[in-house]
Amino acid sequence: AQSVTQLDSHVSVSEGTPVLLRCNYSSSYSPSLFWYVQHPNKGLQLLLKYTSAATLVKGINGFEAEFKKSETSFHLTKPSAHMSDAAEYFCVVSEGNAGNMLTFGGGTRLMVKP
Amino acid sequence: EPEVTQTPSHQVTQMGQEVILRCVPISNHLYFYWYRQILGQKVEFLVSFYNNEISEKSEIFDDQFSVERPDGSNFTLKIRSTKLEDSAMYFCASSEVIGRGYTFGSGTRLTVV
């Protein structure tokens, strides 16, 4: 069975400082991992995905994530936060042998202070 | 950029009524999904649909739920007799192939009163 734990429900950073959103996963098979972002009253937008290629994945808006199998982690980072990054972020896992079902983490709300 | 379109954006219904949530997936996508997010809780998988049949469903997706692709473009979720606990944001998604990442719609906020 697959599961995802997002270690922080809320993260607050100042504009221009680095962002780190933490995610650990559990999977019986080789997983695909994703980060989605949800701005208020908007849908879920794919930020980036890992599907067994390069372990360092670059996404949109300057975000990137590193797949670390030994640590079962897939943390999301950005060197410099922007006010527009304030949103809810979801770490998501999909197991190849579980068909195509996505399992979501609980979400991390990122707040960016001016 | 292609989008998944969901209608309506908000729906209020009385308990016991039937509701149909509508979705137009991306035209060349083959896999379709419904997820829901009860306020303050995780996004949960409901059902996946491929080749005109359900390929996987969760425990949540009981007999009061059904999905249909009535024509070449729409993908619907029907809740036969709504309960208060069905109040949630319902997301439709589609994908071209498995594992590549999904495109989600903006969601339908269903409120059962």
Image: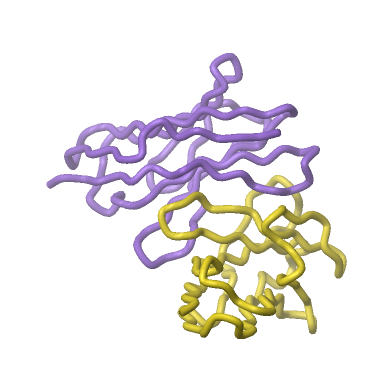
Would you place residue B78 above or below residue A5 in this image?
A: below
Is A44 in front, or is B62?
Answer: B62
Q: Is residue A70 left or right of residue B28?
A: left
* Residue beneath the point at 45% across and 35% down: A6
The extreme top residue here reads A70
* Residue beneath the point at 46% across and 79% down: B113
Is B38 in front, or is B33?
Answer: B38
x and y percentages locating residue B70 in the rendered image: 79, 83
Would you place residue B99 above or below residue A41 in this image?
A: above
Would you place residue B98 above or below residue B113 in this image?
A: above
x and y percentages locating residue B106 in the rendered image: 49, 68
Q: Chain B shown in which color?
A: yellow
Would you place residue B101 above or below residue B104 in this image?
A: above
Name the image quarter holding residue B17: bottom right
Q: Is residue A22 left or right of residue A96?
A: left
Q: How is the image coloured?
A: by chain
The tally of labels here is 0
The extreme left residue here reads A114
Q: Which chain is purple?
A: A
Is B73 in front, or is B56?
Answer: B56
x and y percentages locating residue A41 in the rendered image: 38, 67
* Residue beneath the point at 41% across and 30% down: A7
Which quadrant would the N terminus of chain A be assigned to in this image?
top right
x and y percentages locating residue B112 in the rendered image: 49, 77
